[in-house]
Amino acid sequence: MIDRRTVLAAGALVATACAATPVAKSASTSPKSVRERLSGFALNTESWFLDRPFVERFDAAARAGFSHVEFWALNDQDRSAGRLAKVAADAGVSIAQIVGDAPALARTDASGEFLENCKRAVERAKILDTDVITFVGHQNVDGIPKADSLTAYTDHMAAAAPIFADAEVFAAIEPFNPYDHPGHFIYGSHDAVEIVRTVGSPFIKLNYDLFHMQRAEGELIGNLRKAADMICYAQIADAPDRGQPGTGDVNYANVIAALRAAGYTRPIGLEFWAKDGDYNRAVLDMLALSDAVQLAAG
């Protein structure tokens, strides 16, 4: 667990960073104490700052001290890539990861639709200046056994691999856990790692959501070390309630230190819901986690 007394040690610097509203007053007032300490994380605009419209959450992220964001859905209307690229640029944040559309990839006849979705996702990623697109598509389909589902999923990813290689954009497979996401056939790391190995493309990798991994299989550090060369993106939330680190069971200081030691250099997605909707507290907890990771890394 995070020692929250490390937050108090920040004293006046943290007080400067956090406004009366649930965002920091300025990302530039104390860059070494706030923005730099949060630079290793990407705020999820789907789960943070739910008290304001979606497009305002990018600026809220910047004011809280974050330099990166991530989000899920895109469309051609209110969430167009062009519009959100401008929103991010105006806020001064970079986009670490987006989510692409995937049909039920247990079906062998989903290939045409999936390939078109992949092409569209790559076009959007280029507009948004990001190189990680997460895909799921591993929902169960009645009448299709798990083994056949995994084979079809692998074949679809192999067929799509040249699209991502040509664009130099990663397609990240995200395994789930059976407790929060019933009705899927890829849980934990084992099957996902096997798919990535079988496809053998440098641009078909994993979104290693450590919340899902904890709930699905545990042994976080040992398993991520085994999968380290297949991880192109990582996300965190504490278990079992998906709050910020420090509100549940996981010692994320040690886990993230191990992830970094294994060679992961990208921002880590903060796909969690702040406990009690207290975003100031969540920012403080992330500052404490950043400091604790540094200590754990030695």
Image (cartoon, helix red, strand yellow):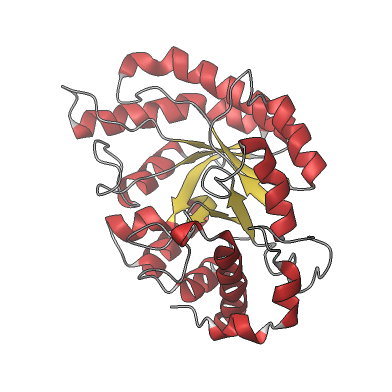
Position of residue 211 relative to residue 281, above or below, is above
Residue 64 seen in the current view: yes
- Numbered label tally: 0
In the picture, measured across the screen, residue 181 lies left or right of residue 288, that is left
Please report the residue visible at 38 percent of the width from the left and 27 percent of the height from the top. Answer: 155
Question: Which of 153/12 is in front?
Answer: 12
The quadrant in which the N terminus is found is bottom left
Question: Which of 278/256 is in front?
Answer: 278
Q: Where is residue 69 in the image (x, y as percent from the top left)?
A: 64, 48
In the picture, measured across the screen, residue 289 lies left or right of residue 181, that is right
Please report the residue visible at 53 percent of the width from the left and 16 percent of the height from the top. Answer: 116
The quadrant in which the C terminus is found is bottom right
Q: Position of residue 39 (x, y in %)?
A: 70, 62
Question: Which of 7/291 is in front?
Answer: 7
Q: Where is residue 144 in the image (x, y as percent from the top left)?
A: 19, 24
> Residue 84 appears in which quarter of the rendering?
top right
Residue 66 seen in the current view: no
Position of residue 157 relative to residue 12, above or below, is above
Please report the residue visible at 29 percent of the width from the left and 33 percent of the height from the top. Answer: 150
In the picture, measured across the screen, residue 43 lies left or right of residue 150, that is right
Please report the residue visible at 66 percent of the width from the left and 24 percent of the height from the top. Answer: 80
> Residue 30 appears in which quarter of the rendering?
bottom right
Q: Where is residue 17 in the image (x, y as percent from the top left)?
A: 73, 68
